[in-house]
Amino acid sequence: MPTKENNGRINARIDPELKAEGDAVLNELGYTPSTLITVLYKTLVRNKAIPREMTMLDPLDIATAQAHDEIANGEDKEFSNVDALMKDLHDAN
């Protein structure tokens, strides 16, 4: 159950270099990460969908972010050799 101290709080992992670059852009625009997330959530709730521009993200960026999340959550896989890796990649499709 959320407490008064953490109600509405979001914790997310992000590459430190990407965060620094993003924070710099937000600062130039006069926004904070919290403001950006609030705007995103309001748009998501209003439209019941992710903003179209965001769904057009580079698939490699999406896959990389998912891989980072899996590693952070201990869901990454190890392979004994390249053939095992390739088999897993092909079986996933």
Image (cartoon, helix red, strand yellow):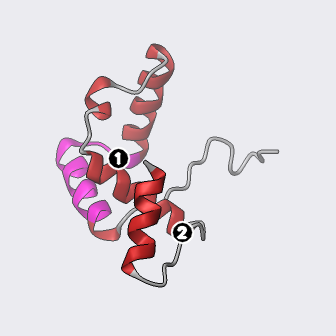
| Tag count | 2
Q: Disc 1 marks which amino acid?
A: Thr
Say which mark, if any, is on residue 32.
1
* Closer to us: 64 or 6: 64
* Closer to us: 24 or 91: 91
Q: In which image quadrant can residue 14 be found?
A: bottom left
User: Which residue is situated farthest in the top direction here?
Assistant: 47
Residue 8: x %, y % from top left: 62, 41
Q: Which residues are magenta?
A: 18-33
* Closer to us: 60 or 11: 60
Q: Which residue is mark 2?
A: 72
Q: Which is the main secondary structure of the residues drawn in magenta?
A: helix
Residue at x 39% of width, y 75% of height: 83
Label 2 secondary element: helix
Residue 81: x %, y % from top left: 42, 83
Label 1 secondary element: loop
| Pointer 1 or 2: first along the chain | 1
Q: In which image quadrant can residue 7 be found?
A: top right
Residue 35: x %, y % from top left: 39, 39
Residue at x 54% of width, y 68% of height: 72
Graded by Cα atoms within 10 Å as few (under 14), some (14 to 19) or many (20 or more), the crowding at tag 2 reads few
Say which mark, if any, is on residue 60.
none
Quarter of the picture holding the N terminus: top right
In the rendered image, residue 24 lying in the magenta stretch gets the answer: yes
Give left or right: position of 2 versus 77. right
Front position among marks 1 and 2 = 2
In the rendered image, residue 84 lying in the magenta stretch gets the answer: no
